[in-house]
Every structure is written in structure tokens, then in C-alpha cells.
Amino acid sequence: MNSLLMELTKKACEAFEKCGYAHDLGLVRTSDRPDLCAFQCNGAFPAAKKYRKAPSVIAGEVSKVLKEDKDFASVSVKGAGFINLDVTDEFLLKFLCEMVNDPNTGVPQAEKEETILIDYGGPNAAKPLHVGHVRSAVIGEALKRIAKATGRRTVGDVHLGDWGLQMGMVMKELEDRGKLSDHIDITSEEWDTLYSDANAKKKLDPEFDKAAHEITYKFQNGDPMYLSEWKQLMKISLKGIGKMYDILGVQFDLWHGESDAAKYVGELMDALEKRNLLIDSMGAKVVDVSREEDTAPIPPVIIKKTDGSDIYATTDLAAIIEREKLFQPDEIWYVVDNRQALHFKQVFRCAKMAGIVENEEKLLHLGFGTINGPDGKPLKSRDGNVLKLSDFYKDVYTSVLARAAEGEDREENAHKIAVAAIKFGDLINFRAKDYIFDLEKFTSYEGKTGSFILYTISRINSVFRKAGKIELHVPEEIYTDSELNLIYALLLTGDKFLSAYEDKAPNVIAESAFDIAGAFSSFYAENKVLSETDEEKKNAWLYLMHATKVVLLKHLDALGIEAVERM
């Protein structure tokens, strides 16, 4: 089904066309002055320039046609040519019913088949997840779900960092400890410190650094011993990484890594050599991706290091070849830190130059900012080190559990509320911006928080438990302004999802959920639903509560948040 604004735009476009004007002039949007009307159309202004008529004259002609449509309660021309629109209660209630019964909850579906591959998560297989991994996972999961909600086929790939020097460093550290063998046996505590210990040695000991590079070269080139030990380390790593993503409710279709892309490096090199793109630079192989129109220098992209080993750009390019072969995606989205913008510009340009993709516009870097502490700096642990993701989650969960109501589902509810706090607290912000994580604020039942949205659904559940067995039917009347405001918030769902998809902005869905929950809170405070003696009015209110729950669950699903039955 069409979204509400799409449906109203369709009517306005037909009216413009009937009056002899271009069909596409009838764009309808929500009103800038909700005190005057619910919707407005400003198409008379661009029409005035095109047809050399006063906008007020054009608006008058179009509004005359629109007044013939019984779905409009009022149509008027204000100012120099603004067309103000209000629709009937019957139209709103009918549209609400269709939306509630629609399998897509009123979200318009893509007109053609499209496949979107989303590269997100990006953990380093050599070390445990830290708080810096939250945003890629949470934003990427939401973007995948939003794309899927609009009818696209989606493929989510974690894209593990599992094939570079970091693995060689860890293997060298294990070798020094006498634990690199056919049967590697290390505790989770040891695993947590391996990379940091190896990194410290690398900085101080040139021999350690040299040996780590040699090991990296060997397993990348198929050395049986090191490749076998690499596989063992990957099993250990994936177990811990997978557990943490499961806790956050982040699900990947593919657990591919740089190692999977490495199989296509040969094909990449052939493509680059065929087009004479490779340049020798002090022993390394690079590609010049600069362009005349660049306003700032764009350095060459390194394909092979001086020792012949691969670099991130190598495997990222090879991964595009792999993805083109396996999925033929219409677009590939990279949900990666803003600081990698230059890297992706280099990679995308190189992919186009090598003929890996015809159009680099299909490759999108969707950057994000950092999670900061109250001091405005990236979150750290209490001892000043990088905060592990497991500790970050534990802090939030512990805070929520301390306030959770008693009951059999207390711990499960606390987990869901904690995840909602983390995800909603992140997603309510535009992804490209940094934000400050405030534990008390993000776990509050008031304000723009996941807890507030979950509490709204819990409140609705409570009303229906008290109401007992009831049979709802579509209302025939809207009784109060608070009902009307809530209905409008619900009916804009389809338009919000379209906007979130087009702008790659999950915050649009988070804001919409908050608007609905806020409108519901006002409605609920004003209308005493269960004690209402007028049965038709009571039914209308209960139906609206049912619709609110359906639509809010749609929003939460898009954000990757689970609801709770009671709070």
C-alpha cells in the first residue's frame, strides 16, 4: 500500500494534471502550521514559474478540483498560493485499519527487486570486542532491517579482520609463550590479553615485529603449519565474538572475513595489471586514484606491501569481486567509522578503475561518529583502557536489573531493557554524529529512551490484560484531539520508513517511535479507557491502543529491539 503522504500526493498530482499542469507538482507534505491544517501542497509556486501565472490563481484552480474529493474535510488557499489540506475522520480511520492489517504495516515496498549487501560489525578477530564496535553493529543491523522492511533483499556481512598482521602478532606472542601448537589451549582471560601484549612487544622489539610480519606472510601464502594454527585461533575468536553479538541481538547472514576475500586477490591483481594500473613505489605495489577535480590530495592506494603481503585495501577490493560474483548486489553499504572515509574513497575509485564495478555510486560508505563519555572523550574503562563491550553491556544490565520489578522474567526483561537502552540511545542520534553515553539518562523510563518505548507497549499490554476477552472493530468516529494526534503519528509510519531508507538514517525511525509513544502518553492521560461507559468510544480507544502496539512493534523490529510483556 501507499504511505499516507504518497496517497495524498497522488490525489494532488491528479488535480494539477486535470487543471492542465505537470503531474509531478502535487507533492503533499505535513503542514508547517499544524494549527491551520494537517497537510499542505506548495506546487503552485514552481508551477507559477513554469506557466507564468500567479501562484494564487493556480492554487485556486487546483483546490477547486480537490474540493470535489470526499476524502478531504477542507481545502483552502492561504497566502500567496499555499494549498492547505485536512482529511476526513473516515479517511483516517480507513487508512489506519488498512495499515494495521497490512503485512508490511503500511511501509511501501520497493517497485523492483533489489539486493543490498551491508558490510558492518568489522571486528578484529585477534582481540575481544570493545565499546567502539557498538555503533557499526547497532547501526548496520538497523539499516539492514530498514532496507528489508521496504522490500529489499538484504545480505549482512560481518567482514572479520582475520587475515592481516594482527593475526601474525598474536601467533608470534603464542609462539613466545610456548602455546602455538597443533592443539592451542588458552583461556578466555589469556585471549583477552594476547593482542595487547603482542602490540606492546611489537612497538619495543624490532625482532618481534619482523617475526610477526614473517608469520603473516607465511599463513597468507598457505604455509600448512601456520594456516592450521590460524584456523584454531579463528574458532576461539568467533566463539567469543558471536556470543557478544547474540547478546546485542545483532545477526549476520555471512561470517566472511578478509581471509575469504583473499581467494580473489589473484583475480584483483590480474584486473589491475590488465589495465596497467599497478605502480612500483619503493618496493610496494600501488594504484594512483587521484583525479583532476580533487580539491585535496588523494594518496595512492597500496595493494601490496613491500614484503608482498596484503593490506586492508587489497582484501576490501577482493571482497567486492567476491560479492559481485556471489550476490550481484545493487548496492554495497559499508557501515564503518567516519575516520575511514579516505580509505573507502580510494577503494571505491580503484574498484571503478579496475572494472570491478561499472559505477562506484553503488558503493556507499555510511560513516558514524564515536560514543563518548561525560567528558566528551571516547568511552574508557575505569582503569583508562579501552572499554570491553562485555563490560559496557554488564554495566548497563546491572543498572537496569537493580530497578527491575520482581517476577520470573525479571532477568530476561532486564536484558531486553538494557539492550534497548544501548541501541535506542545510539540510534536516536544521526549516525554521523558523536554522542555522549549517559547511563542514567539512557535507562530512564522518561524522555527519548528505549525504556520509554518499551514501557509504552507494556502499558498497552496491561490495559488489555485488565480488559479481558474483547472483540475489536474499526472505529467510526474520532472523539478527541489526543486521538487525532496519535492517529496522525501512526499514519506517518510508511513515510518515515521511506525517509529512513533514502537517507540511510535509523534515527528517523527512533524519532518516529518516540513521537508515537509521546502521543500515546498524552492520549492515555486524557482518556480513561477502561472506565469509559460509552461502548463505541471505549472500542475506538482500545482499537487505537491495539494499532499503537502493532506500529510500535514495527518500529522496534526495525531498530533491532525486543519488546517486553510487562515492566
Image (tube, rainbow, N blue to C red):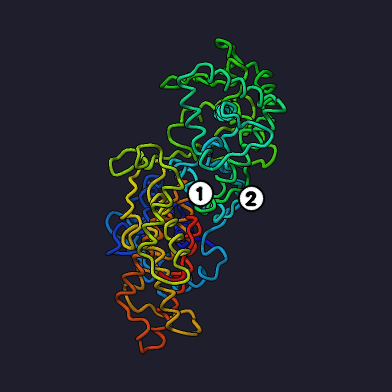
**For residue 215, side relative to residue 558 (left or right):** right
Q: Helix, strand, or loop for circle 1? A: helix
Q: Position of residue 230 (x, y in %)?
A: 64, 33
Query: Residue 113 has which mark?
Result: 2
Q: Position of residue 378 (x, y in %)?
A: 36, 38
Q: Is residue 127 above or below residue 247?
A: above
- Judging depth in this view, the residue of 214 and 161 nearest the camera is 214
- Judging depth in this view, the residue of 468 and 414 nearest the camera is 414
The amino acid at mark 1 is Leu
Identified at 39% across, 52% down, the residue is 395
Task: Classify residue 449 by image quadrant.
Answer: bottom left
Q: Position of residue 113 (x, y in %)?
A: 63, 50
Identified at 32% across, 43% down, the residue is 373
Q: Position of residue 308 (x, y in %)?
A: 62, 18
> Residue furthest toward the front?
178
Q: Do we see residue 195 in this rendering?
A: yes
The amino acid at mark 2 is Glu
Q: CA distance from mark 2 to mark 1?
A: 17 Å
Identified at 57% across, 23% down, the residue is 212
Dot 1 corresponds to which residue? 143
> Residue furthest toward the right?
224
Task: Classify residue 279 by image quadrant.
Answer: top right
Q: Quadrant of the N terminus?
A: bottom right
Counting other residues with Cα less than 10 Å from the Cα at mark 1, is it few (<14), some (14-19), or many (20 or more)? many
